[in-house]
Amino acid sequence: MLIGIVGKPNVGKSTFFSAATLATAEIANYPFTTIKPNKGMAFVRAKCPHIEFNVKCQPRNSACENGVRLVPTELMDVAGLVPDACQGKGLGNQFLDDLRNADAFIHVVDATGSTDCEGNAVKPGSHDPVEDLQFLEREIVEWIKGIMEKGFDKLARAAHLESMKLEQVIHERLTGLGVSEAQVSAALRISSMPAKIIDWKDEDRYRLAQNIRRQSKPMIIALNKADMADPALMKRLSELEGYVTVPTCAETELALRRATKTGLITYVPGDKEFKINDSAKLNPNQKKALDYMAQVMQRYGGTGVQQCIEKVAFDMLELIVVYPVEDEGHLTDHDGNVLPDAFLLRNGSTAKDLAYKVHTDLGDHFIRAINARTHRVVGHDHVLENEDVMTIVAKR
């Protein structure tokens, strides 16, 4: 899974990215700090089965903290988007091209209204963040629409004459964006398109592109700098119809993760509070900063950064966590590691999908799978459930 961190310049995208991944990203108070996309690993939290099975896990591709499995997922911080990016303004062409492989977006918005539409600093509250929501959605939709329309008239005539399926015609145009035919089909169903493709007008194609975006690349809104935003504005933004919003304080999250790394505090990302370690020797500035961060977390129930990532993974993309093992009796891999791996799969994935996720050879030579909890033998089309522990049996 790849989540794109998007938004106009200078709203805290790189701070959000660094907070979520602790990867190094250039952070500065001016537009276009990020030129090339930064990639890093974040994680989502799941229940580790080692407690249920009363064993000691030995994670390999993830981590486990007090029974919470931290499953990795990839984030990408791209160059800021400005109005008319789809026509090449700013770093628009590069920005949009970088997003081709993203499965979902986190749109970071400056909730204080202190940056204009191009990311320049302005008086707090003088810019309406709602404009940022609308223009970024429009730019991405126009980008999808533009790809869909390349050679579209010729294709539409051919499709009309040959009675091709509409979802097949559109899907052929958008394969480079990672859009599936099923997602195109779903978008067509809700778009109320004219019956004949040759009758589609510009506004029809825009509406379809908008629904394709919603089906294929869902987006959550991170209302960043929430601790400094006007409460009335935060309330208005949080209640916007048609948007999923989360108040976030990326600077607080980044500071907490760094303080944890130096041993000053104990904090698990996503928690609603942190604990100052008894051995920590804080200077007055550090104590003041931590007191402020504790107040911010109490107000919002955390910093919102981890919540954004997990809402995208579990609510929007409907992912589940599955634990493959080679020996269902001992819950080990071939090296004897207990519950070594945790994988994210789409809800509805089958045992054979898991086999391919682990290794192509396992998928190609799949025979059966075994549920380690029930010891039930299942076939290739068995639909997996969240937190399943499975053994894959394949021809050698």
Image: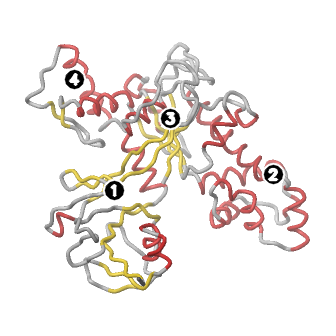
Give the quadrant of the C terminus.
bottom left
Snapshot quadrant of residue 357: bottom left
Q: Earlier in the sequence, mark 4 or mark 1?
A: 1
Q: Nearer the viewer, residue 363 or 151?
A: 363
* Residue topped by disc 1: 61
Direction left: furthest residue = 278
Separation of residues labelled 4 and 1 (CA atoms): 35 Å
How would you rate the neighbour count of disc 1 (Cα within 10 Å): few for under 14, some for 14-19, many for 20 or more?
A: few
Judged left or right of residue 375, residue 275 is: left
How would you rate the neighbour count of disc 2 (Cα within 10 Å): few for under 14, some for 14-19, many for 20 or more?
A: some
Q: Earlier in the sequence, mark 1 or mark 3?
A: 1
Q: Amino acid at mark 2?
A: Glu
Q: Which mark is residue 291?
A: 4
Separation of residues labelled 1 and 3 (CA atoms): 28 Å
Q: Amino acid at mark 4?
A: Asp
* Residue topped by disc 3: 108
* Residue topped by disc 2: 149
